Image: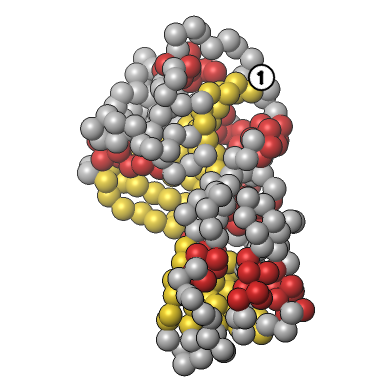
Amino acid sequence: GVNPQVGCVILDAEGEIIAEGWHRGAGTAHAEVDALSKLEVVPAGATAVVTLEPCNHTGRTGPCAQALIAAGISRVVFASSDPGATSGGGAQTLRDAGVEVVGGVLESTASEQGRVWLTANRLQRPFVTVKWASSIDGRAAANDGTSKWISGEESRADCHLMRSEVDAILVGTGTVLDDDPELTARKPNGELYEHQPMRVVVGNREIPEGARVLNDRAETVQLRTHSIHGILAALWQEGIKHVLIEGGPMVASQFVRLGLADQFIFYLAPMLLGGERTAIRQLGIETMADAKHLEFVEIKTLGDDIFVRAVPRSA
């Protein structure tokens, strides 16, 4: 979403927790303010422990750094620094006001939790997750184009849950023309999740009247361009922090080729299909020395399928 997931606890001078708070979404109180609201009086020597550096700007709510100063907090401990051009700088504001500040505590743990928001704000573009379901030999469809269903019910349910947690789902016009997907986030019983991501269709071909992606169950935007950088810039302007690339193989390949895939989600089914309909296409790799290496972050079974989450290997 627009704002990061942040938690805050306030400790008294003896180190006992006296208040907790967290941010519930855009326009609601930030974690620090939420925690402070639980206290009638902030005792002397109190410490605020926060997962993200307190913000330093006024948006829908006021700056958390100023709220902590006004409340009389003596010490602030945070995990991750805020990379935002406008929201960052809270640590220095606190220090200038005489508050003791300690940053970088359990930073790697907090950064993993907040990796989507932190990456998006550092790069000033949406965090990109490339997802596909394939046979164990890497095919996304049989030779006749049929693909329902490669993955099992558990994998499909997991994918719908993931859709409910992103800001946008992106496909090419080819996927819309071939598969007529709805691209909504649905519970196993068919009901819609409360949050529905924006449906983004890229390409110049017309979306047919009556296509399911044009129904009123979620917002749909068509971007008539093949410029991947232009697509990400347009989505960033719309406030999109996390986009899920669902297809087709040509679109996914472009993001990977340009090094713009921040995370990969694979659903691998225990079947062999062979043929030419691979889940990923040309990446411009001619020799093993140019291979794009990944690091496995999570591997588990979902029913009969294998779920894999991976990220590009750090240089």
- State which quadrant residue 189 falls in: top left
Residue that badge 1 annotates: 224
Residue 106 lies left or right of residue 68; in this view the side is: left
Q: Secondary structure at mark 1?
A: loop
- At 44% from the left and 17% from the top, the residue drawn is 215
Residue shown at 57%/33% (left/top)?
Answer: 253
Q: Is residue 165 shown above or below 24? A: above
Residue at the image position 56 percent from the left and 89 percent from the top: 44
Horizontal and vertical percent position of residue 160: 36, 37
Residue 287 image point, x, y percent: 61, 43
Q: Residue furthest toward the right?
A: 96
Judge from the rendering whether residue 252 lies leftward or rightward of residue 315; answer left or right.
left
Q: Position of residue 217 (x, y in %)?
A: 42, 24
Judging depth in this view, the residue of 293 and 79 nearest the camera is 79
Position of 37 with respect to 188 (left or right) is right
Can residue 83 be seen here? no
Give the vertical position of 233 relative to 79 (above or below). Answer: above
Name the kind of residue labelled 1 in the image.
Answer: Arg
Residue 4: quarter of image: bottom right
Characterize the local packing of mark 1: few (<14), some (14-19) or many (20 or more) Cα atoms within 10 angstroms: some
State the image quarter where residue 225 is shown.
Answer: top right
